[in-house]
Amino acid sequence: MIPWSPILSFHEALLLVCGAVILYGFCLRRLAEFAHQYRLRLAEIGEKYLAICDDPDEKTEILFYLDNAMNPWFLVSVSALFPMIFVYILIRRENRERKHKDDSTYSSILELFNISVFAANPLFGIVVVLEIVAFSLLSILVAGNIVMIKRAILLLLRREAGRHVAAHSTS
């Protein structure tokens, strides 16, 4: 006699997983359509900002943002590196912040990059947001310092940009 119950329950689970994958694909497509206008705006503002920027480190960051605006693996690496960067910032306690050529334009570039990257991989985007919230609460409880969280995120972005430039210069 054939055990139909386990076979059917396996197929139900398989059908559920396939449905979830298809639904996730549709959501990714809708997010890509939504983010398209922001990606175009990012490219426009970023190119204009590169023309007026004098600092090579700042140019490297902007180029990194432009090159990785649609990279789904960026948030995967951020989710893996964020705890280490947080601990590094917690131990080091460095208080210097870089000044940008035009802070409002730089901030808008960073916001557009964040929207674009989140749309490229919303699953790990949610993971990164949850990590930021958890480490922010931990930071507030341990150190009472919100500025440290901002420095950790900026340092993480700078390290990713530096690694990106190093990879391009060796190839």
Image (cartoon, helix red, strand yellow):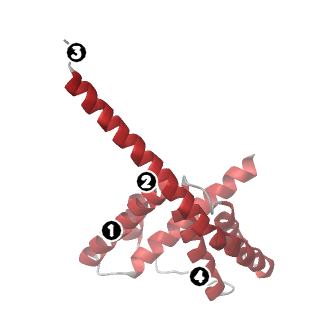
| Disc 4 and disc 1 in contact, CB within 8 angstroms | no
**What percent of the width, then of the height, locates residue 162?**
63, 60
> Which dot, 4 or 3, sits closer to the camera?
3
Q: Return the residue at label 2.
A: 80
The answer to whether 73 appears left or right of 105 in the picture is left
Which one is nearer the viewer's eye here, 12 or 132?
Answer: 12
Q: Alpha carbon of mark 2 to alpha carbon of mark 3: how far?
A: 46 Å
The answer to whether 44 appears left or right of 39 in the picture is right
> Which dot, 4 or 1, sits closer to the camera?
4
Could you tell me the amino acid type at mark 3? Ile
Say whether disc 4 or disc 3 marks the residue closer to the N-terminus: 3
Q: Return the residue at label 1.
A: 135
Q: At x 47% / y 75%, what residue is drawn?
A: 151
> Tag 3: Cα neighbours inside 10 Å, few (<14), some, or many (≥20)?
few
Q: Alpha carbon of mark 4 to alpha carbon of mark 2: how far?
A: 24 Å
Q: Secondary structure at mark 2?
A: helix
Looking at the picture, does residue 105 appear above or below residue 47? Answer: below
Q: Secondary structure at mark 3?
A: loop
Q: Quadrant of residue 9?
A: top left
Q: Quadrant of residue 137?
A: bottom left
**What percent of the width, then of the height, locates residue 92?**
41, 69
Say whether disc 4 or disc 1 marks the residue closer to the N-terminus: 4
**What percent of the width, then of the height, locates residue 127?**
39, 59
Circle number at residue 2:
3
Q: Alpha carbon of mark 4 to alpha carbon of mark 1: how far?
A: 22 Å
Say whether disc 3 or disc 1 marks the residue closer to the N-terminus: 3
Circle number at residue 51:
none
Q: Alpha carbon of mark 1 to alpha carbon of mark 2: how far?
A: 13 Å
Could you tell me the amino acid type at mark 2? Ala
Q: Secondary structure at mark 1?
A: helix
Q: At x 62% / y 59%, what residue is drawn?
A: 70
Q: Return the residue at label 4.
A: 107
